[in-house]
Image (cartoon, helix red, strand yellow):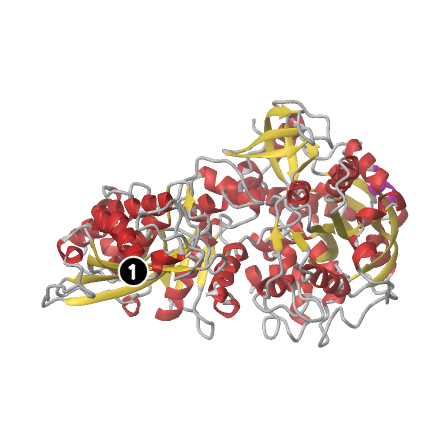
Amino acid sequence: MTPHCPLPDRITTTVCMAHGGGGSMTASLIGEIFAPAFSNDYLNRRHDAATLPTTDCRTAFTTDTFVVSPIFFPGGNIGDLAVNGTVNDLLCAGATPRFLSCGFVIEKGFPIDDLRKIATTMAEAARVAEVEIVTGDTKVVERGRCDGVYINTSGIGYIPHGLDIDPGNIHPGDTVIITGTIGRHGMAVMSQREGLRFSSPITSDTASLCDIVGNLLDVVATPRVLRDPTRGGLSSTLNELAEASGVDIEIDESAVPVMPEVRSACELLGLDPLYVANEGVMLIIVDPADAAKALAAIRRSAHGADAAIIGRVAPTAEGRRPGVWVRMPLGNRRRLEMLSGEQLPRIC
Amino acid sequence: MNPCDPTPWRDPQIMRKLLDRIAATVTRPWNIMEVCGGQTWTLARYRLEELLPDGLNMIHGPGCPVCVTPAETIDDAIGLAMRPDVIFCSFGDMLRVPGTDGSLLRAKTAGADVRLLYSPLDTLDIAVENPDRQVIFFAIGFETTTPVYALMAEKARERHISNLSILTSLFTVPAAVSAIKSDPDCRIDALLAAGHVCAVTGLDPYRQLASDLDMPIVVTGFEPVDMLLGILRAVTMLENGRSGLSNAYGRAVGEAGAANARAAVGRVFHLSDTSWRGMGIMPLSGMKLRPEFEQFDARRRFVSDREHVSVTNRDYPDSCIAHLIMKGLRRPADCPHFGKKCTPACPVGAPMVSSEGVCAAHYRYLS
Amino acid sequence: MTDQTKCHRIIAFYYTDYIMCLAVPGKIITIDDDGLFRMAETDFLGVRRRVCVDTVDARPGDYIIAHAGIAISVMDSSEAEATLRDLNLMTDLRDQNFNRS
């Protein structure tokens, strides 16, 4: 334990090193904040590991780490982002999300009240998505070693029998659907950033999309692919799909739904909404015969009212690399490059 | 109507009509240079060039400040940013521009305090909030951007803010255009002047330039309809054998320009010989701080004196032909590195960096 | 951990790849003379930002073009209307079966 950290055996107003030390301070942090927020049968046993029921379904398992800055932004915070992000990743595999773990890395000095707000938001997001947070971990690092708080969530979901979602299933002629307006999360975060600040009614779209996927699967037995276009935006997801499936994807620029304020904010900062992050929309590709009923099912779901057909899958021209094309109003088209996606892993 | 609404200026019907009219007007090949990087970006974004009639060539001029800032200046910026007492502020585009070795982005990764700002005016607050640090803004730009630096320097002097300075790399359009046009290999028949530059300078300097160079100059906006209107005016003048100035961006550019902005620039800066990346020093083609504002000159305060060489071999490594492209003598596709060794993710020359750099615009939208 | 911190900050600003020459039209809502500069609360089609208007003669209700936080022009709505009227009135060569050769 660090000597400069006062050690009253109770919750203080900010997080100190002892909160991550594994002793009584850790226990009180968990007991006063996380356990009551996330309470469920699995967590309440307080084992080192949660013991989960078995099933004869295939199991989907995913993990994601959230480092958003600022931690609180219009429309959400890092907590619901962390739950919804992992839930949506499970949904993209066709799974019904069931269990989450969460790991916190907290910077010394982080306000306890903020931590409580984050935990409450996470609990609410988990309730909406009908998942349970069954295990967790807390670590505290010295000031400057992280930016407030980072959260990792991993998730387990069960895939119904007979459902096989795979980019390899995409065929030329398939229909491309987006479930909502794009660019909201990225611009909501950007509006709060030092040096770029602007005021707008834009809120993050962070949401779990269980309703959309549930309604979709009711009418379309096997959609070709589901993806959530998060960091890197719609363009990165489309490019990944085109590359993975060896086909071209052509989207109609004027069909992509964008909130007017998001479009204005992008114009102001010189950004293209196709590259801006989303946290509550899904890109769905279906057989063209299923397109109309898929669209109708999505539109009557929570967060699906603005869904639209934005394009189609096309064969790749002989001798060209597969890619994404944007059809413009005059009929000519431009290639939509994967912009920042290429470089990010190298910078990291 | 709301003149802020871009919709009519992107109307495909109007674009189609203008394209048809351009095609009906031209009878022989012409080369038209658009000066500003923002206009290059529009051409590439809407793929307008492929819709123009054969023989009507657009040449992408040197009007992107990111692309013409010398490598030497980038090196100075990186050196300043790496100092522990410095908060180095910049527009987003400059961060990835390669200097001789590295970029501001790499300096930031290595721990430098590099901050991205939308407006240089924000540096005044940053300087006041951090009295024990030196706040430096990377002041790049053309006539459009120079006024904001003038306001900033005047206010800093008035408020006795002593820990604020700018690293300047400021250019003026007319001198550069004259220099390019005087190159015996130059094949530019008409010029689209950058509307937002003219919004500050007013029309007089361009009327003079059109008369000096004896060619058509059309003041042009940045939306696709604006671009096509500018091109139509230019080819109409060329086909009729006329030179002179035409304003195709009347909603934003008035005869007198922004007089207050120009006055502020005049109080703080003076014209000077300036070095352009890959093109060397061109006489009276840029702006420097006046002696009474020297205290805000980061170069004078923090960078040791050295001889400034004209075209430095730092500018373009490995036979990059960016300077020839910006003069209209080559096209991006002529470069052996284009799309191979040199991409937006890993640029060799500066025009591959900024979204409005000619090579990057070609790579992203034309490939 | 230090590397991770840096990594996320780089991601954060990397995708603000905005264009330096960008100038955007907006409508002045109010003007505040009290601070360092004459600042106009400006509406950019639903998004608001403060813009310095010391550079131009502008009043609330005027349309300006903003660049890097300052106004560089007061727009002329009648010019915009005139240009668009001309463009809309321009004959569509296709309607006339115009022979392009």
Magenta range: B204-209
Percent from the top left, x then y, of residue B3? 59, 31
Percent from the top left, x then y, of residue A224? 26, 62
Residue in the foreground of this view, choosing between A281 and B33: A281
Q: Could one spot residue B3 in this view of the protein?
A: no
**Residue beneath the point at 73% across and 30% down:** C56
Q: In the image, A202: left or right of A116?
A: right
Q: In the image, B355: left or right of B150?
A: left
Q: In the image, A133: left or right of C82?
A: left
**Residue beneath the point at 75% across and 49% down:** B165
* In the depicted structure, whether residue A120 falls above or below residue B79: above
**Residue beneath the point at 24% across and 58% down:** A100
Percent from the top left, x then y, of residue B105? 61, 62
Q: Considering the image in quadrants, where does the N terminus of chain A appear?
A: bottom left
**Residue beneath the point at 36% across and 43% down:** A113
Q: In the image, B125: left or right of A98?
A: right
Q: Could one spot residue A47 in this view of the protein?
A: yes
* In the depicted structure, whether residue A330 falls above or below residue B155: below
In this figure, which residue is indicated by the disc labeled 1? A23
Q: Give SS at disc 1.
A: loop
Residue in the foreground of this view, choosing between C54 and B89: B89
- The total number of labels drawn is 1
